[in-house]
Amino acid sequence: MEQTSLKKTTLGNYCLTVTPEAHQSHMIFRVEVPVLTDEIRIDYSYSPTVEKVEAKIDSLFSKYQEDNQMPASDRQYIDSVRNLITISASSSQGYEGSCHRFESTGTIIINGTQSTPGMHTREIQPGFWDISFNFHALVTEKTEINCTIQAIHKGDRIASQPIEIADITKERLKRERKPAVPAHYQKVELHSHTQHSDARHTTTELITEAIKMNIDWLAITDHNTLSAFDEIEPGTYPIQFIKGLEMTTLHGHFLTLGYQNMRPVDWTTIDRSNINEKLKEMKAQGLLVGIAHPFDVGSPYCTGCRWQYALQSLEYIDFIEVWNSEDPHYSLSSADAIAKWTQLLNSGIEIPATCGRDWHHSNTTKKPALLFVEAARDAKEQDILEAVKQGRSYLSLAPEITLSINGQWTIGDRIRLTDVKEIAIRIALENAASAAVVRIESNLGDLYESHRAEIDFQLEKARVEDLLWLRVSAFDSDLNRILLTNPIYFEQSW
């Protein structure tokens, strides 16, 4: 092994004080081991090692004499009592071993060639490792522990850019539309919180505010918990609920929607190396999974808010939240998210965009956006989630839109170009006083721009040869985007 080519990353540096109350317990330090790690090194020390003060030994003897069935005469043979702390390790592969020693200072090496006796010698598995301090005996008034955990690995740890994927593919959904069904849109909020996580308002207060806004479907997505739903009696409110949570991990947040009586995946087990496996597990539960605010500022300012997982593909991601929080049209992170989403669409990835208020309180003058989801008036939760997955929706701060092509297709549809002789686009906006500019956008660039609320536009046949998708955006007088539809898709054969 050429040590000069290896790097050291300090995974944890701990200084702590424990007392006899922690006697016969375990303290676990969870660290994330990077990929390509060759070795884990644990340097530790603790002091003092023994207790020799006679009065304290008398007290310990008295406390434990009965448990050990020791006669009083045994006290004369005890001139000291020692602390005993050992170290164990576990990885995603399982138990990695333990160093049961009496030394109060030392170094433990774990690698694939020659580990410290007590630890298994095998290739280092990246991901979360639990380094456990085992307090067999704590007898001194205080015990000071110092521990440094390092990874010895090839290359630097490089932070990934949001939504970095290895395989830019995603299976296409079926998009058949039943004819002669007028589009009806329901107002949906997919991202909200209560006092069951970090919001100001109670569950009841959140629901009351949502009802005031005439929201049809409210997804409560507290951080890593479903406990708010214990307070909701079905059928009590004039609003429908989506049972969800925001999986709030150290390297990314994502919305998981559609829990029935299922237990969520344990978020503390998710790391950079197993993210794809964990997403697959969530999809096997039947959940809808979407990346939340991928371009927000990250650690340490907002731990995990910025998406830093490298995905093998987007197969297990159903949507991307491109608008987050209030006034999303002023946000640079929202602009970055829309740009990344557009890049994916241009690459042939059919993945929908959503918005989420990330609702923590209602004491604000800022504007929230809502997701308008096409669904029948009597739609069930699964119908709403399927429509979100299909991208049969648009994002808006106020305007409402009707969009159709040839009077037959609308948002979320796919058009086979062999089925049409012309592309007649009809757009009608309502509640659109703030809309100054309307654009038809596509992978070919902007196809059309207008200042009117009603638009009839004929797309010339010569311009659609390489058309993959089109969508509509509306902008205010300062050219801030205030409405964004999901695409209508096209199959490239004429």
Image: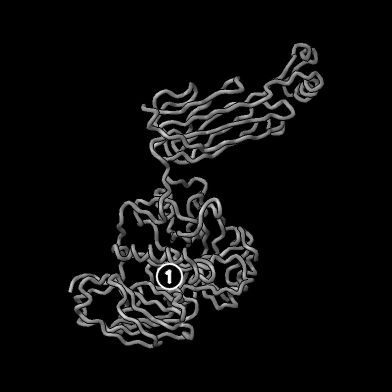
In which quadrant of the rendered view does residue 87 lie?
Answer: top right
Name the residue furthest right: 55
Question: What residue lies at 72% left-to-right and 30% top-to-bottom?
Answer: 142
* Amino acid residing under circle 1: Asp
Is residue 256 visible in this depiction of the protein?
A: no
Q: Which residue reaches farthest left? A: 494
What percent of the width, then of the height, locates residue 440?
A: 34, 78
Between 153 and 284, which is closer to the camera in this rendering? 153
Reply above or below: 337 against 13: below
Residue at position x 60%, y 75% in the image:
365
Above or below: residue 451 compared with residue 291: below
x and y percentages locating residue 245 in the rendered image: 53, 59
Residue 376 position, x and y percent, is 43, 77
Identify whether 292 is placed above or below 374. Answer: above
Question: Looking at the rendering, in which quadrant would you find the N terminus?
Answer: top left
Q: In this view, does 429 lie above or below 323?
A: below
Query: Which quadrant is home to the C terminus?
Result: bottom left
Quarter occupied by residue 195: bottom right
- The colour style of the image is one colour
Q: Give coordinates of residue 43: x percent, y percent.
A: 54, 28
Drawn side of residue 153 relative to residue 211, left or right: left
Query: Does dot 1 land on a helix, a strand or a loop?
Result: helix
Q: Tell me the residue at 79%/23% (across/down).
A: 56
Q: Is residue 437 left or right of residue 227?
A: left
> How many labels were placed on the picture?
1
Front residue of 292/150: it is 150
Point 56% across, 37% down: residue: 29
- Who is closer to the viewer here, 97 or 465? 465
Residue at numbered disc 1: 383
Q: In this view, does 223 lie to the left or right of 394?
A: right
Crowding at dot 1, Cα within 10 Å, few <14 / some 14-19 / many 20+, comes out as some
